[in-house]
Amino acid sequence: MTRLLAPGKLVIATHNAGKLREIRALLAPYGMECLSAGELGLPEPAETGTTFAENALIKAHASASASGLPALADDSGLCVTALGGAPGVYTADWAEAAPFEGGPGRDWYLAMGKVEGKLAELGPDTPRECWFACVLALAWPDGGEAVFEGRAVGSLTWPPRGTMGFGYDPVFVPLGDTRTFAELDPAEKHRISHRADAFSKLVSSALAE
């Protein structure tokens, strides 16, 4: 049986503002006071794992250990069938851009272009099926942990469309829709996203009613 997460303070192990907004919205009904690793000034650990679960657990345990509070980490990415599941766990790495103002930046348009370019190299009839994967990892200061996996299936479109998402959202069209994630109202996206799928599993297993 998964350990229950009691209402109270919870560290969200991220420095990504878009991801933090989504997670806070999803946890809002459960009495959790969400503090981000960025707000607490916690360092970002090296994500040396080769799977989403490994990286999510690295981040969750680092934040739980540093803060003395339970921590929740998300590791997620775009997986393209025709590219053998790439970029997958290296999704953010594909968005690495030149440093600016003394710090590293990420150029998501560049990343989306890389994906499109690799598909174009495979030919015009290349299947465009893909999925967003999300792994949520809970960690407690005493070393306890739990992992929940979610997925949103869809296809890629080009050029990017929409302004309400982040990351690869402007090129991802969820199955059964014609709009990209970045064209959906955030509340609508929250209901069908890979993160929402993982959260539904977390809620049913780890959150007290």
Image (spheres, rainbow, N blue to C red):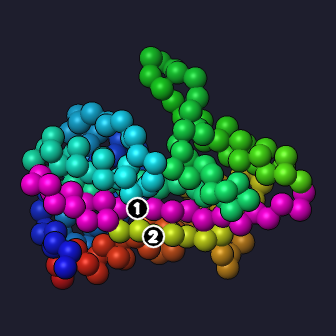
In the image, which disc is placed on residue 171?
none
Q: Is residue 98 visible?
A: yes
Whole-percent x and y of residue 180? 66, 63
Q: Is residue 173 left or right of residue 8?
A: right
Question: Which quadrant is the N terminus positioned in?
Answer: bottom left
Q: Which residue is mark 1?
A: 135
Q: Is residue 134 magenta?
A: yes
Quadrant of the rendered structure where residue 66 is? top left
Q: Residue at x 44, y 65 (%)?
A: 195
Label 1: how many Cα within 10 Å (few below 14, some 14–19, many 20+): many
Say if 21 sits above or below 129 in the image. above
Percent across and percent down for residue 34 are: 23, 56
Q: Is 45 contained in the magenta span?
A: no
At label 1, the amino acid type is Val
Q: Quadrant of residue 175?
A: bottom right
- In magenta, the rendered stretch is 124-147
Q: Are marks 2 and 1 in contact (CB under 8 Å)?
A: yes
Q: Amino acid at mark 2?
A: Gly
